[in-house]
Image: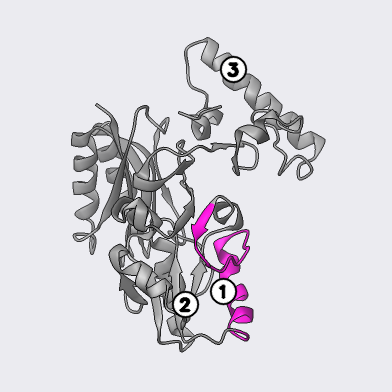
Amino acid sequence: MPLIVAALYKFAALPDYVGYKSALETACKEAGVKGTILLAAEGVNGTIAGTREGIDAALDHIRALPGCADLEHKESTADTMPFLRMKVRLKKEIVTMGVEGIDPTSTVGTYVAPEDWNTLISDPDTVVIDTRNDYEVGIGSFEGAVNPQTKAFRDFPEWFENFRKTNTKPKIAMFCTGGIRCEKSTAFLKSQGLDEVYHLKGGILKYLETVPEAESKWQGECFVFDARVSVGQGLALGSYDQCFACRRPITEDDKASPDYEKGISCPACVDEYSERDKARFAERQKQIRLARERGKAHIGEEAQAGGKS
């Protein structure tokens, strides 16, 4: 049976989040689940994989946290385990924007169901903004969407402050992979006094799962933060691999380039790292190879588990 991959998040007031770490990690490990979950005072966020029974048990534990009873998640499947271990990490934010006072539990934009999304983004009074980072947008986005070309989500507020000076459209529709970044970005826009702010409920993943391909306005593939790298319509496995030096998605043509060395560089990042960095990456690849020869898993292999290269 294929494994279940569950992407989840919930903004909820968790002032005692540090105290939940140990029990949550233990519950997931006992359920045979692997992946990463982030805990912060503002809520929970993560992606985990396991059997049907294991995922259900882990989700039951998470939903027992204060304010998380109605946590929703999105599921897909994988033939092999995309993670090597289970980690629960404590963070300042479950998705880092770096703006104080933004609280999606009190104010967010208007949710738009996937089946209604096409109508909204086809409205000439609507500007559509992709809130993801540039390497994610590079492999797929919605027709006509604005690409902020941000390197990290914390760059979005500054970008938007400049963008709004020239934007003339009254409606703003935003989207991201699973919805979490849009919760914060719409809350940020509302804090700036904007009223007609909308976001895609469930994110791109729910849209690809829900909207038939013949009606889809999505172009390309959607980057995901696990060993699948990307998915397409119906959440089918995509065609991209990943550079394990810079974490960008790469194609087979990229891998045929002389600038590509597995785990060391790709055409996009070959000039971004020093020779010392590349030597460190090469040593990591060597240790991964030696661990495999001994039939063991190396900690540096986690990002590469289940990869296509």
Q: Are marks 3 and 1 in contact (CB under 8 Å)?
A: no
Magenta segment includes 147: yes
Whether residue 173 is visible here, answered yes or no, is yes
Q: Name the N-terminal-most of marks 1 and 2.
A: 1
Q: Is residue 124 left or right of residue 81?
A: right
Q: What residue type is labelled 2?
A: Phe
Residue at x 57% of width, y 37% of height: 242
| Region of the chain picked out in magenta, as a range | 140-166
Per the model, the C-alpha gap separating discs 1 and 2 is 8 Å
Q: Which three-letter amino acid code belongs to the residue tagged 1?
A: Pro
Q: In which quarter of the image is residue 236?
A: top left
Front-most of 42 and 109? 109
Image quadrant containing the C terminus: top right
Q: Is residue 94 magenta?
A: no
Residue wearing tag 1: 157
Q: Which residue is drawn at 45% across and 40% down?
A: 226
